[in-house]
Image (spheres, helix red, strand yellow):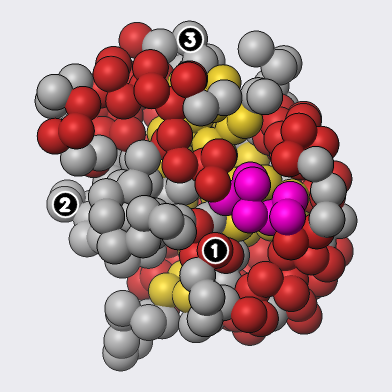
Amino acid sequence: MYLVDSHCHLDQLDLIAHEGKLSNALAYAVTQGVGHMLCVCITLQDFPQVLSVAQNYPHISASVGLHPNEVAVESEPTADDLATLAQHEKIVAIGETGLDYYRSTGDLSWQHERFRQHIRAAKKVNKALIIHSRQARTDTLRILKEEEAATVGGVMHCFTEDWDMAKAALDLGFYISFSGIVTFSNAKELQAVAKQVPLERMLIETDSPYLAPVPYRGKSNEPAYVRKVAEYIAQLRGIDVIELADQTTTNFFNCFKQARR
């Protein structure tokens, strides 16, 4: 089995179970069939570490971006700033970026502008977008359309919305990525979406160290557990997990414009 964890934060993993060594956690993931991982950046001060992880391992790629809830330490990054950082060959995406109205309140025009700058950067370098959207469905879709984000595409990461949102994102050329949340017993609406999204437009992820799937819910997450997400969705759809693994792996390399490694 060859799986891809399409969204993880390797620089933030809890490594206690792996003798404090990232290499051990990655080796364990390989034993679970995880052949590739995308280490996602959420702050620009963390970007050097994110890039370093990707540079040290041939089966890891990385992104550059400033999460919608994170504070810009100096100034807001411009599209040119982000595009410059994205020039490295190990950087395959811009993000994660988007809108979050759950953890941010008040006048969020700054969040809208940050999102637009990320989309413009992605278009400059022709790299995919990693979209975070929480309780901001209408504005997320509106800005994606206004900025013509469909020209580069990308993924709606850690998807938790309904089918209408998924269909709108699919129509814009985006992939839909499911995390461990889909395994939760109270995620019935999301499970229905996971059954309906075309398999050729689906990705899977851990978002580790967050959102560990059942049976690890409540514990620290890690890339190896993407196998549990794959197994759950395969059972949900009534297909072999190998089929789901093969297709979501192909989808990943298509989405991020990479040759399969």
Q: Residue at x 31, y 79 (%)?
A: 104
The picture places residue 216, in percent across and down from the top left corner, at: 36, 54
Q: Which mark is residue 58?
A: 3
Tell whether position 233 is magenta.
Answer: yes
Mark 1 neighbour class, 10 Å CA radius: few under 14, some 14 to 19, many 20 or more? many
User: Disc 1 marks which residue?
Assistant: 183
In primary-sequence order, the first of circles 3 and 2 is 3
Q: Quadrant of residue 145?
A: bottom right
Tell whether position 80 is magenta.
Answer: no
Determine whether, in the image, residue 261 is placed left or right of residue 198.
left
Q: Which mark is residue 73?
A: 2
The picture places residue 124, in percent across and down from the top left corner, at: 62, 37
Residue type at mark 2 is: Val
For marks 3 and 2, give the CA distance. 31 Å
Residue range corresponding to the magenta coloring: 229-235
Secondary element at tag 2? loop
Secondary element at tag 1? helix
Secondary element at tag 3? loop
